[in-house]
Image (cartoon, rainbow, N blue to C red):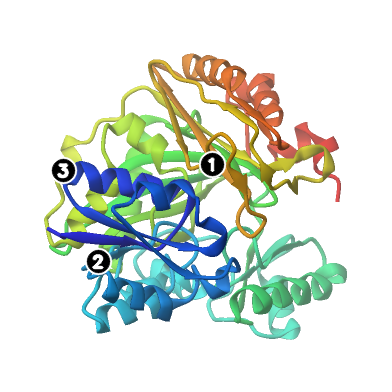
């Protein structure tokens, strides 16, 4: 087992990893930018080291500085969390060359599954259903339009290296295809330094269902059930829950077995997520694989009573999976709300600033993952998510009631947040009945989704 782990991240996920390491008796090293000198993860870790100025390109995304910090602090592994360098194949490769264990899959697997057009080809070869679309990478408007005509409009234009909703556009006709393609490609080049695109049929108003998987180096792979991530705004998840109200036991078994087959097809090791689109007729299609721990992993932990961060660390240390598929039981219902420092009434404009007062909810079945505290100043340099509120109860109806109660108890003063917006979602009759899809927010809250 590792003696010391460096956490190449910040915020609540860095705190989450530090706590898991503490419980396992593993020392931790926090890295921080100058803007995060007083951040909670720097205070909780056994050791901390500054890696540069506030901009992430000069700190949390600087591979050389992070690897140097790891060597200087004599850590024998790096946990990347999510975001930043977590799905960067080059970083995973450099870790290996420096004899540092990267807590995640190999660079080869990240490369294969991180490139979405390559992932599609791999899944098709493994017999995993995919949305009809391009079989080869697309680089020009002409190539894309030819594929779009073959697939049939509407189509989704996607960046092969994309993520977080970036580099994605829907085209409904030949007339708007060129503008959408060029805009998506420009966004991809700017965000990922990659002009590789692919085209697939646009599935109207599907559910976004993802399966958590774990794989070890001995070929064992299990799934831990699904998360319903259909409540989204501009392809960014807002609220997640497990299990999904739309999934029967029979369909869960079928989708879970497909997720395991997909992971085995690439020899997957560590924690990952197989993401599917589920249409109105219960047909499901592979969308992408995330080769890291997810923001929404706590809802899976809540219904399986497993610690996914500990599992990640044990797998990376060479230990076999602690469970078999037969051991895994889904119990109760869990919901996670992402609380962001933003103003929904001003097009969700980020609202960094000083938290002048904060009260966190508690009680049975209530969990808060955060790195903020009273008089903490949220820097303007990073993602606006400041807190994850997670609840678990015996069934979905009870979990919704518990989440509404917890949101009512949560107080954050000094900044704008999306707290009231989350409460409105949970109070909506369609959400309460489970009648949701990825178009839920635009269709139910048009006042918040104006361009």
Q: Quadrant of residue 175?
A: bottom right
Q: Earlier in the sequence, mark 2 or mark 3?
A: 2
- Looking at the rendered structure, the secondary structure element under dot 3 is loop
State left or right for residue 138 relative to residue 87: right
Residue name at image x 71 percent, y 85 percent: 140
Which residue lies at the image location 78% right of the left edge and 33% below the top edge? 445
Task: Choose mark 2 or mark 3, whichever is in front.
Answer: 2
Residue designated by label 3 = 323
Side of 328 where 147 appears, left or right? right
Residue 15 vs 374, above or below: the answer is: below
Residue 102 position within the rendered picture, expressed as x and y whole percent measured from the top left: 28, 68
For label 1, the residue is 229
Does label 1 or label 3 sit earlier along the sequence? 1
Res. 77 mark: 2
Residue 395, position in %: x, y?
Answer: 42, 17
* 265 to the left or right of 111: left
Between 435 and 20, which is closer to the camera in this rendering? 20
Q: Residue at x 51, y 37 (%)?
A: 388
User: Distance of mark 1 from mark 3, alpha carbons?
Assistant: 25 Å
Mark 2 crowd level (few <14, some 14–19, many ≥20, 10 Å Cα): many
Give the number of callouts.
Answer: 3
| Badge 2 element | strand
Quick one: SS at disc 1?
strand
Q: Indicate the quadrant where residue 188 lies.
A: bottom right
User: Do the residues bearing badges 1 and 3 touch, measured as CB atoms within 8 Å?
Assistant: no
Q: Give me the C-alpha separation between circle 2 and circle 1.
A: 31 Å
Coordinates of residue 233 in the picture (x, y in percent): 69, 46
Residue 148's tag is none
Q: Is residue 183 visible?
A: yes
Alpha-carbon span between mark 2 and mark 3: 23 Å
How packed mark 3 is, by other alpha carbons closer than 10 Å (few <14, some 14-19, many 20 or more), is: some
């Amino acid at each position: 087992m590792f003696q010391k782990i460096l956490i190449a991240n910040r915020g609540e996920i860095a705190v989450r990893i530090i706590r898991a390491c503490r419980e396992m008796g593993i020392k931790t090293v926090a890295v921080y930018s100058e803007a995060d000198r007083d951040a909670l993860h720097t205070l909780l870790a056994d050791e901390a080291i500054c890696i540069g100025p506030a901009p992430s390109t000069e700190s949390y995304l600087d591979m050389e500085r992070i690897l140097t910090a790891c060597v200087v602090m004599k850590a024998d592994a790096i946990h990347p969390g999510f975001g930043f360098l977590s799905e960067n194949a080059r970083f995973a490769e450099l870790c290996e060359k420096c004899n540092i264990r990267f807590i995640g899959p190999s660079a080869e697997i990240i490369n294969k599954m991180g490139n979405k057009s390559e992932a599609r080809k791999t899944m098709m070869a493994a017999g995993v259903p995919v949305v009809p679309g391009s079989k080869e990478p697309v680089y020009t408007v002409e190539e894309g339009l030819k594929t779009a005509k073959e697939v049939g409009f509407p189509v989704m234009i996607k960046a092969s290296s994309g993520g977080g909703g970036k580099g994605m556009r829907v085209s409904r006709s030949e007339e708007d295809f060129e503008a959408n393609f060029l805009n998506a490609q420009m966004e991809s080049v700017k965000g990922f330094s990659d002009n590789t695109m692919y085209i697939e049929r646009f599935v109207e108003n599907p559910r976004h269902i993802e399966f958590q998987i774990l794989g070890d180096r001995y070929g064992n792979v299990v799934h831990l059930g699904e998360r319903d991530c259909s409540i989204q705004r501009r392809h960014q998840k807002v609220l997640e829950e497990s299990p999904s109200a739309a999934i029967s036991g029979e369909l869960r078994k079928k989708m879970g077995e497909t997720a395991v087959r997909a992971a085995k097809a690439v020899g997957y090791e560590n924690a990952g997520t197989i993401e599917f689109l589920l249409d109105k007729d219960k047909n499901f299609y592979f969308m992408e694989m995330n080769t890291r721990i997810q923001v929404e992993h706590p809802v899976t932990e809540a219904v399986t009573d497993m610690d996914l961060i500990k599992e990640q660390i044990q797998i990376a240390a060479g230990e076999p999976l602690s469970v078999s598929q037969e051991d895994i039981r889904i119990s109760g219902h869990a919901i996670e709300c992402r609380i962001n420092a933003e103003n929904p009434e001003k097009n969700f404009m980020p609202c960094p600033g000083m938290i002048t007062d904060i009260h966190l909810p508690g009680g049975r079945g209530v969990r808060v993952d955060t790195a903020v505290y009273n008089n903490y100043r949220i820097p303007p340099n990073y993602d606006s998510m400041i807190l994850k509120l997670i609840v678990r109860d015996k069934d979905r109806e009870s979990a919704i009631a518990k989440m509404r109660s917890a949101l009512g108890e949560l107080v954050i003063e000094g900044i704008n947040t999306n707290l009231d917006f989350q409460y409105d979602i949970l109070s909506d009759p369609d959400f309460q009945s489970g009648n949701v899809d990825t178009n839920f927010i635009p269709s139910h809250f048009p006042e918040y989704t104006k361009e």
